[in-house]
Each structure stands twice: as C-alpha cells, then as structure tokens.
Image (tube, grey):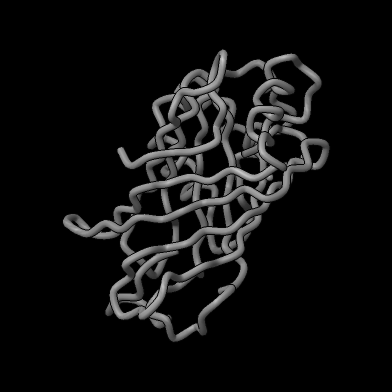
Amino acid sequence: MNRKDAAANKKLTCPTSTSVRDRKVAEDACESGGELDAFARLRLQKDEAWKVNVRIQGIDLENGYLCGTMEALNVPLADTPVVTFWEGELVDGNNFTFFTRKWEATPEDDIRHWSKFPSFAPLLSQVEADGGKNMDLSNYPYIFMRWKEQYFVNVGIDCGLTIAGFYYVCFSCSDGSINGFYYDPNSSPFQKLELKCIPGGCSGYTFSSYQLL
C-alpha cells in the first residue's frame, strides 16, 4: 500500500518442508484461529510514515501460499482507515523462487530488493545464477516472501493510495521480526515496512501481536 504521488499515474508462513522448525513457526503463527495482528511503521517518504495493521488469515505451507489484510491508518486524503486484501508467496525454491517474473519486476529488480536484507547475502551467488531454484531453505533462519495487495476492501480506488506494487518480505525465525520493501516502478523506491514481535507465552514468541519499531 503506497501513497500516490506526482510521479505515478496511477498465510505468517514457513517453508513447505516438514522440519520441526518450520512446523513450530507455523503453529505459532497460526495461534488464535490462524490470524495474526501486526502493527508496523510504513515509511513512504523520508519524513513520512503511518501505522498499519496486518492480519494473516490463511496459510497453505504445501503450496507456499498465504493471505491476509492490511489496514492503513491516518492516511492523507482518506477519511477512514484503508483496508486491502493481499496474497503472499513463500520463497521455498519449490513453489516460488527469488525471481518474481511478474508485476513488472525484473531479475535485476529482485536482486536489488532482496539484497537490502543482510540475511540474503549468503544466498546471493546462487540466486544470481538461477533465482534459487531447488534451493533448500528449510533450515535457513530467515523466511523470504512476497506480499501482493489484490484489492481495496472498504474504499474505492480514489482513496489516495495505489496497490500496483508488492512487498519483498523477510521474516526472522529467531526473534519474529519482519521487514519489507515495497516495489512499484511508478513509486518512490525502497519504501520500508518494519514489524517487531512482542515476546509472550511460556516459551518462544507467540506472534500474536507486533509493535512499532
């Protein structure tokens, strides 16, 4: 979700393997009926940011699919919070690779955005070769995804936002933090989505809520 500007005309998931780590993160993420409430700071311009609530409503590990909603609060030019429905792809080397191959993203765009995550550095050479096809990420301590907003839920397309782009997303299995970078060739580059997990429960992280960084 991104603010329209003058330049524009315009399931948390885990790898599909059966490893204990993947199952544990999936179970945590699916706690409370498979939904996850998240709070993030979405940085659009240098000095501009607003709060968003993210809810993950469905996860299909076998097919590398997830979906949910994103609610943007205090959006300029909008009289009400703006809610969108999004669908996600899990980069698992099987269902999806690091190369997007759609949404106007070239392999070069993919490399530039994934490289914004320090955790991607050890994977760079193989991804440059073939996009990470058949790469085994089942025990990697980070999970990479793409989130693509599909439509506005409660407002029209004249709400002052565009959902033409998508997010490159990285989830840390160690602390539950999530970072993302928005890509849309007609928007400001590298707009950042930041989420931080709040520890809870008897052990580990419950992934039941997030707070602003």
> Where residue 169 sits in the image (x, y, percent)?
51, 42
Viewer-closest of 207 and 84 = 207
Q: Which residue is drawn at 71% across and 32% down?
A: 93
**Residue 182 horizontal side relative to residue 5, left or right:** right
User: Looking at the image, is 58 positioned above or below residue 188?
Assistant: above
User: Looking at the image, is 188 positioned above or below residue 30?
Assistant: below
> Where residue 204 sits in the image (x, y, percent)?
55, 16
Q: Which residue is drawn at 46% across and 70% down?
A: 82
**Residue 108 horizontal side relative to residue 58, left or right:** left
**Residue 15 horizontal side relative to residue 44, left or right:** right
User: Looking at the image, is 76 positioned above or below residue 42?
Assistant: below
Res 24 quadrant in image: top right
Res 208 quadrant in image: top right
Viewer-closest of 142 and 102 = 142
Quadrant occupied by the N terminus? bottom left
Q: Looking at the image, which residue sits at the far left? A: 47
Quadrant occupied by the C terminus? top left
> Where residue 131 sits in the image (x, y, percent)?
62, 37
Q: How many marks?
A: 0
Viewer-closest of 106 and 14 = 14
User: Looking at the image, is 205 positioned above or below residue 159?
Assistant: above
> Where residue 164 sits in the image (x, y, percent)?
51, 69
Q: Residue at x 49, y 63 (%)?
A: 165
Res 91 quadrant in image: top right
